[in-house]
Amino acid sequence: MNYSEKLQNVAILGAAGKMGSGIVLLTAVEMMDQSLLPENKGKTFNLHAIDISYDALNGLMKYLRTQVLKLAEKKIVALRNLYSDRADLIENGQIVEEYVNSTLLFVKPSTSFEPAYSANIIFEAIKEDPALKVKIFSQINQNNSKKPWFLTNTSSIPIGMLDKEAGLEGRVIGFHFYNPPPVQKLVELIKSANTIPELTDFSMAYAKRIKKVIVPSHDIAGFIGNGHFMRDALYGLQLVESLKSKYSFPEAVYIVNKISQEYLIRPMGIFQLIDYVGADVCHYILGVMQSYMKDEILHNQSLDTMISMSIKGGQNSDGSQKDGFLKYEKGKPVAVFNIETKDYRPIEEIKSKIDSVLGQLPDNLQAWKTVIGNKSKDSYLKEYFSSLKKSDTYGARIAIDYHMNSKKVAEKLVSSGVALNANDVNTVLMTGFFHAYGPINDFI
């Protein structure tokens, strides 16, 4: 089977979830675009959107209609050419409506795994649980005579383990989208030692068609993205522990979040990022990584305590941020959780005390949004970090240490064989996490 033939029958597991819905959108649009090619006229495409709740799947279909409509309106010029042989489609509105309706016809919602038993391709975006993934992969594999290919969205579980335990004989690859898949350009591609070349070729072709930046990672738990992020988060958590002798828990969290965002010129502070991903998700991923890395401690007591109190962060169904280490109003942090008193302390109370302790930021500090658009970004960053080091304030010293630890973590990802090279680590952090610069640099 060639690329388009493989794409004619696809199943997506976890289709109504945060990641799955984006994968459904991208795949449905790619199916539609394939169906409009002259060589594919008359061919049937089926996308089985599988999840546990019909209510959630109904929500998925509404989301798809809205998003496909936006995409169709953006590429109306190209669509007019593709539909040039349709005399019944004259107005732009008619063309857009035809494209949207035809795309949605490919999508077949289901709460049963049975449609996956005839699929050529299985995209998986379910819970990050090794045992659950193995169970479902095995079930589908045993009931599907086509020997389907599995593209798993896992962000931490070794592909070789999934392959071996589910008996897939090399028909599985890590295809790690970043959240949200329609927006994020990055995909980490993780082959096991047994992944068949044809599956790799398909994955590369699919990624190119949906305009993704592919970064390969070796099959080591956590891969590049979580390999850096989880250790970066642990460093932040451990720094809070070390600061608790001088400052309250909310004050220490405020210090580390401010340092990791403002001083290091990142889009979010580390505790905002933990909240965005979900403290419970981070906790689980660390557990998965720990099971494969016995010589490293990937654990933090404060994170355990937050989980035990059900302070988890993550997003609500409408995409708004749930409270976690920080409390949010209209998406902005307004307070910090206090583990001792189990309530939130307003940031304004903390700010007035702590900012003077941290000291003045360098005069040449630019906001993250400004830096990412700076054509002379590297030159500016060298000047900025030089100024930061010379300032020698309390905040600057913490920031320099944080920066150097981030670099150390990144360099170890290369030296231990997780990443092929420094550029791949930097690409993941800049593309997947929107950092203004990669952690492996010579700014200091």
Image (cartoon, rainbow, N blue to C red):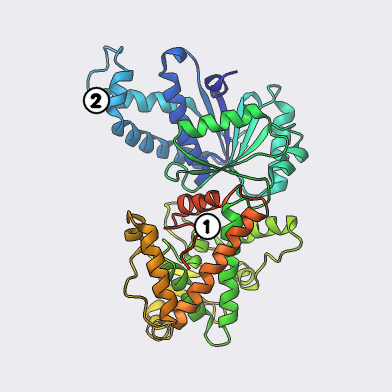
Residue at 31% of width from left, 12% of height from top?
Answer: 85
User: Can the viewer see residue 273 in this picture?
Assistant: yes
At x 42%, y 26%, the residue is 103
Residue on which the image places disc 1: 277
Residue 25 locus on image (x, y percent): 45, 35
Q: Which residue is mark 2?
A: 92
Q: Can residue 116 be seen at all in this image of the molecule? A: no
Q: Would residue 211 appear left or right of 369 to someone viewing this image?
A: right
Residue 362 in percent (x, y) is at: 36, 75
User: Does residue 394 lie above or below 98 as drawn?
Assistant: below
Above or below 263: residue 436: above
> To which quarter of the image does residue 217 belong?
top right
Q: Secondary structure at mark 2?
A: helix
| 34 relative to 375, above or below | above
Residue 148 screen position, x and y as percent = 66, 27
Q: Work out how far the residue at label 1 is from the one at label 2, CA to CA, in angstroms.
A: 40 Å
Q: Which circle marks residue 55 in the picture?
A: none
Between residues 408 and 78, which one lies in front from this camera angle?
A: 408
> Of label 1 and label 2, which has the lower sequence position?
2
Characterize the local packing of mark 2: few (<14), some (14-19) or many (20 or more) Cα atoms within 10 angstroms.
some
Instruction: Decide which of 314, 2 is in the foreground and name it.
Output: 2
Report the number of numbered marks. Answer: 2
Camera-side residue of 360 and 351: 360
> Could you tell me the amino acid type at mark 1?
Val
Q: Quadrant of residue 52?
A: top right
Q: Residue at x 48, y 81 (%)?
A: 251
Q: Are marks 1 and 2 in contact (CB under 8 Å)?
A: no
* Mark 2 residue type: Asn
Alpha-carbon neighbours of circle 1 within 10 Å: few (<14), some, or many (≥20)? some
Quarter placement of the N terminus: top right
Name the spot of residue 298 as percent of width and height, x first.
68, 64
